[in-house]
Amino acid sequence: MIPWLSRALAFPPLESALREPNGLLAAGGDLSPERLLLAYRQGIFPWYAPGEPILWWSPDPRMALLPSELHIPRSLNKTLRHKPYEIRFDTAFRRVMQACATAARPGQDGTWIVADIIDAYCRLHELGWAHSAECWMDGELVGGLYGVAIGKMFYGESMFAQRPDASKLAFAHLVRWLDEQGFGLIDCQMHTEHLSRFGAREIDRATFLRELTRLNQMPGSVGPWHYPSERKWED
């Protein structure tokens, strides 16, 4: 059995998370900005299917990427340097979330990005905590991702692509920009081969929490992010 959260803004100790399914910690509660920020500061995130209660997770090990260790696959490098596209931050946050919700994913039937999740993260975005990185081509939003930033820690949530490599282009530019801004870690949550190709790797929960705590306490910018529209990819 897992604990059912009350109205109090508190979570059970992470050591009580289940091993199977990996990281399931608690159920219930709400998706208020205060609870979501508290969760992220403790290495916890919500993930649940339509019709389920809110489920809270903290898996061990944790997939993470050091921005300074970003690896660009050779097949993507040429596209980054030559294909016409534009990267923007925070200009279409809700649209990015809606596109992530409808994106087809291998092995998944349906989406966990339900209407309540979209509304909750849009509130975080309005408050300056949640951000989107977007890939535009010919005036159309064709790919992107969103996540939450606290201090110098970025928590990635989901991405989508409607043209080949569009989400990868947004991701690569975002990671390099985060590195330039002094961000020390990107939370990728669960292992995927897609992210491992970019240099993400699994680390144990204790190490992840030590880094998370340190980076959360560093000064960060709360509010809209801006990416220079004229900026091009450089090797």
Image (spheres, helix red, strand yellow):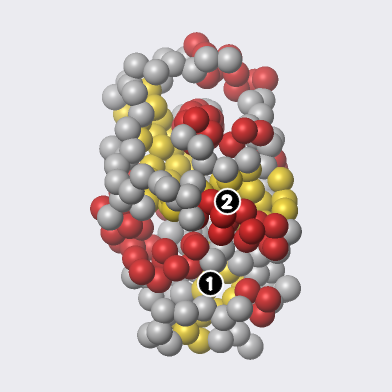
Figure quadrant of the N terminus? bottom right
- Callouts 2 and 1 close, C-beta under 8 Å: no
Q: Residue at x 33, y 48 (%)?
A: 222
Residue situated in front as seen by the camera: 33 or 183: 183
Label 2 sits on residue: 187
Rendered position, 150 above or below 42: above
For image coordinates 36% across by 29% down, the residue present is 227
* Position of the C terminus by quadrant: top right
In the structure shown, which secondary structural element does the residue marked by tag 2 occupy? strand
Disc number placed over residue 95 in the picture, else none: none
Give the vertical position of 228 relative to 215 (above or below). above
**Residue 144 in the image, given as x and y percentages of width and height:** 43, 38
Judge depth for marks 2 and 1 and give the one in front. Answer: 2
Picture quarter containing residue 17? bottom right
Left or right: residue 4 versus residue 117 is right
Distance of mark 2 from mark 1, alpha carbons? 15 Å
Q: Characterize the local packing of mark 1: few (<14), some (14-19) or many (20 or more) Cα atoms within 10 angstroms.
A: many
Residue type at numbered disc 1: Trp
Residue 43 in view: yes
| Amino acid type for the residue under numbered disc 2 | Asp
Q: Residue furthest left?
A: 126
Identify the residue position indicated by label 1 in the image: 56
| Left or right of residue 230, residue 154 in this image | right
- Label 2: few (<14), some or many (≥20) within 10 Å? many
Question: Could you tell me which secondary element the residue under label 1 belongs to?
Answer: strand
Where does residue 112 sit, x and y in percent of width and height? 48, 62
- In the figure, 117 relative to 97: above or below? below
